[in-house]
Image (cartoon, grey):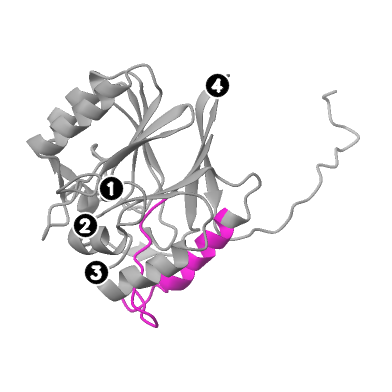
Amino acid sequence: MLLAHLTDLHVRPHGLAAYRTAETNMLTERAIDAVLALDPRPDAVLITGDLTDNGLPAEYENLKRMLSRLPMPVWLIPGNHDRRENLKAMFADFPGLSDHPHFAQWATDLGPVRLVGLDTVVPGSGAGRLCAERLAWLEERLAEAPGKPTIVAMHHPAFVCGIHHMDRISLLEGTAEFEAVIRRHPQVVRVLAGHHHRPIQALFAGTLAMVAPSVAHQVVLDLNDKPAGQFNFEPAAFHLHLWTETSGLVSHTAYVEKAAGPFPFLRDPDYPGA
């Protein structure tokens, strides 16, 4: 099983850039090209929020047209830049988004692996929350398959990363309760998130938590407590999660932009190996 994890697309209405600088529509199309060029292609694509920049119907229309190019199932959860009601209405035919009456969250089986998408959005806030209803739903979904390796996906990371302006708008409510739920279910092999626009990993609740970089723009790596955040155009990337019976879930970083090469490994005559 091969899962592609993309995040933070920030799709805009046709012809408009995000923050007047980031051509996120073009960058999203380029990321889809990169997914389609993979061999083998992923069995499914997961996109963990900030699908659009403002949650506007015109943005979701653009996004739906782009995602129609992908032949595999695409699983979506919202981020703080999305509007849950517009997402659920526009993508009602996408898998899972009609499963819950209030939130945009779902659970599915991808062959040997279970994938649970969790809605952490608080309308009107950049930060995330897991209320009692969402936590109870997560507990129920995890209890359904205690012996199956499970990935939990969300937008807001549940750990402090050291980029202070992002930590101030991470998962701020329900974090301790969420950690307790994950600890009670050792079959959770990854907790995947977006939001921070950087590749970040941490041990969390007895498992590995991973933040994927954006396929558009990246947050500047600044571990000083400065008042305002900035973004740049470090290489856009996404994560690939490969399940094998031998090694379990193995995670790779795939870059969107094509690099020079490939070149053969031509060994020097003085190489000391076999």
Contact (Cβ within 8 Å) of mark 4 with mark 2 = no
Foreground residue among 152 and 44: 44
The residues tagged by marks 1 and 3 sit, at their Cα atoms, a distance apart of 15 Å
Residue marked by disc 4: 247
Q: Is residue 222 visible?
A: yes
User: In the structure shown, which secondary structural element does the residue marked by tag 4 occupy?
Assistant: loop
Residue position marked by numbered label 3 in the rendering = 54
Position of the N terminus, as image quadrant, is top right
Instruction: Say whether residue 22 is magenta.
Output: yes
Mark 2 vs 1, N-terminal side? 2
Q: Residues within 10 Å of mark 2 (few under 14, many from 20)?
A: many
272 is higher (above) or lower (below) than 59: above
Q: Quadrant of the C terminus?
A: top right
**Amino acid at the residue labelled 4:** Ser
Marks 4/3: CA–CA distance: 40 Å
Q: Which residue is mark 1?
A: 155
Q: In this rendering, would 220 be left or right of 141?
A: right
Q: Position of residue 267 (x, y in %)?
A: 85, 38
